[in-house]
Structure formats: C-alpha cells, structure tokens
Image (cartoon, rainbow, N blue to C red):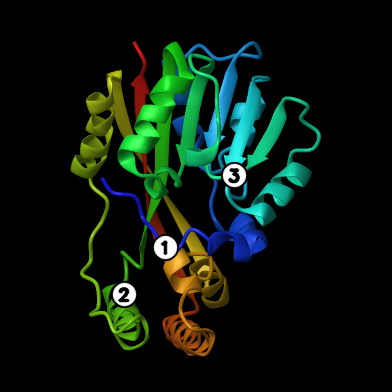
C-alpha cells in the first residue's frame, strides 16, 4: 500500500475547522483496543498524526505517557492548548518518518486516519522497532459514505463533482468493506507482527448543507482546488442539498486493525 503524496500540507491550513468537523471514534473501538492490550499509567504510547486530537482523549484518560507526533504546526499548537491539563501529554512537531524514537520502548503506537500518508515499509518497520515485545500497533480510520439513503441526491452531487472536481467522472456508489479491512490488517504480517485482529464499526451523522460543505473543506484534495472554483463547487453542493430538504446523512464505516510485536 503506497503512501499518499503531495497534499500533506493542506490539513494544517484548516486546523480549526478540521478539529470541529472531523468526527471522533466510537467507544467500542477503544474497548477493543483495551481488551487487546493491558494499558495503564505505567505505559508509554505514541500517536502518529494527531490532527485535531479526535483520537487522543481516550488514550490520555488511561494515565499513560502519550507522545504525539504531528507534521502540522497549527495542529500542534491547537492540541497543546486542547490537552494542556494533561501532564502525561507531549507533542513533537515533525514528520513521523523524520522523528527519532527509542527502540523497544513503547507499549502502544497508534494512528487514526493518518497512517496512509506514510510509505508502508517505512511506517511499519519503524513502528515495529519502537514497540516493546508484546507491544501493540493500532491503526484505524473513518470511511464516510454520503447520502447512502438518497440516490437522487447522491447522483446530483456526483454530477457536480464531474463538473468542478478536476474534471473527474462521477464516482460510483461504493462502501468500505470487510474485505478491505482484512487486507489492511494483513499488511502487518509482512513486517513481523502477529496476533492480527480487525473489526468494523458503523454510525451515521447528519449535516446541514452548510455544515457538509464545511466538512468537505477539511479534505486535502478539496482544499487543493483553486479557490474560485472551490467556492462555486461548494455553493452548487450546498444548493443541491437544500433542494433535497436541507440536510444530508453520512454513513460512516470505521475500521480498526490491531497487531502485536512478538
């Protein structure tokens, strides 16, 4: 699985909106992590790509020593303020690939909707080296499926994408599958991890037309669109959602992969 390249810079330009509109992760996901690993205040953890801190608080509340590594300066400052009451929290502003971590030191390394930005071999090999024996790598991400319940709305939005979004053809209706989650989980085996597990979690979110466009404005490929085109693009989407009652439902699938260093 290759890393995504070229748009890493975009998220930090909308840090506040990202923190507001990107969702947290379900309690059941953390329950599965904590059932997989014995985790308490004596443990050491690293979060790869903290972003707006959507996946940070449940780990901090265990009392563990958590170090986040984040490429974006705005995100780093936001999270320093957001978690300033937690003395067990620290953050390094740097790319994960370029940050030095001690080998055989950490009980948990995890990444939420960020690990796909890192080249596979670099990321997995580095995490494996960082972990203690029996340490855990947790990788999870959110996969949104907008307007699953409203085919006409979905098709109209996709026609707008076809017009404004890099002249791409409208996308087909697809959802993230268990097979994809299983394939992602198997990657860890190539790098020496064992006891591979994965799970899917589901939820729905409802947005007004303006809220949904604000959410779209936190996605890297949308941020990169030329500003005047992006304004027209989002205006068309907002008008379309308003024409269909003023709200849109997003159906989320969240995948979790767990792996252990022998």
**Who comes first in sequence, dot 3 or dot 1?**
1
Q: Is residue 256 visible?
A: no
Residue 52 lies, with reference to residue 125, above or below; the image says: below
Classify mark 2: residues with Cα within 10 Å, few (<14), some (14-19) or many (20+).
many
Say which of 158 and 245 sits in front: 158
Q: Which mark is residue 40?
A: none
Q: Kindly report the distance in space between the C-alpha atoms of the residues bearing marks 3 and 1.
A: 16 Å
Residue 211 coordinates in the image, percent (x, y): 56, 70
Placement of the C terminus among the 4 image quadrants: top left
Q: Quadrant of residue 179?
A: top left
Residue 128 coordinates in the image, percent (x, y): 39, 22
Classify mark 1: residues with Cα within 10 Å, few (<14), some (14-19) or many (20+).
few
- Name the side, left or right, on which 136 lies relative to 186: right
Q: How many numbered discs?
A: 3
Classify mark 3: residues with Cα within 10 Å, few (<14), some (14-19) or many (20+).
some
Q: Nearer the viewer, mark 1 or mark 2?
A: 1
**Who comes first in sequence, dot 1 or dot 2?**
1
Say which of 138 and 189 sits in front: 189
Mark 1 lies on residue: 6
Mark 3 lies on residue: 94
Residue 259 coordinates in the image, percent (x, y): 34, 23
Provide the secondary structure element on which disc 3 rests: loop
Q: Determine contact: label 1, label 2, CB under 8 Å.
A: no
Q: Quadrant of residue 248?
A: bottom left
């Amino acid at each position: 699985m290759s890393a995504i390249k070229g748009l890493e810079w975009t998220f930090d330009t909308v840090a506040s909106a990202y923190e507001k509109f990107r969702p947290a992760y379900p309690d059941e996901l953390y329950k599965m992590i904590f059932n997989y690993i014995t985790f308490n205040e004596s443990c050491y953890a690293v979060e790869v790509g903290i972003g707006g801190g959507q996946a940070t608080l449940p780990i901090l509340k265990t009392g563990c020593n958590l170090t986040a590594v984040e490429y974006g300066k705005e995100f780093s400052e936001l999270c320093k303020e957001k978690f300033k009451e937690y003395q067990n929290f620290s953050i390094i502003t740097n790319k994960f690939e370029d940050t030095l971590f001690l080998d055989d030191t950490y009980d948990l390394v995890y990444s939420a909707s960020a690990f796909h930005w890192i080249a596979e071999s670099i990321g997995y090999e580095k995490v494996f080296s960082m972990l203690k024996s029996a340490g855990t790598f947790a990788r999870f991400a959110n996969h949104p499926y907008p307007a699953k319940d409203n085919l006409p709305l979905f098709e109209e939005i996709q026609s707008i994408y076809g017009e404004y979004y890099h002249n791409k053809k409208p996308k087909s209706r697809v959802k993230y599958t268990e097979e994809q989650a299983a394939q992602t989980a198997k990657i860890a085996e190539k790098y020496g991890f064992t006891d591979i597990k994965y799970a899917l979690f589901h939820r729905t979110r409802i947005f007004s037309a303006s809220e949904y466009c604000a959410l779209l404005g936190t996605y890297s490929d949308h941020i990169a669109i030329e500003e005047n085109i992006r304004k027209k693009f989002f205006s068309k989407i907002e008008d379309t959602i308003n024409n269909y009652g003023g709200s849109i439902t997003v159906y989320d699938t969240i995948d979790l992969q767990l792996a252990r260093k022998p």
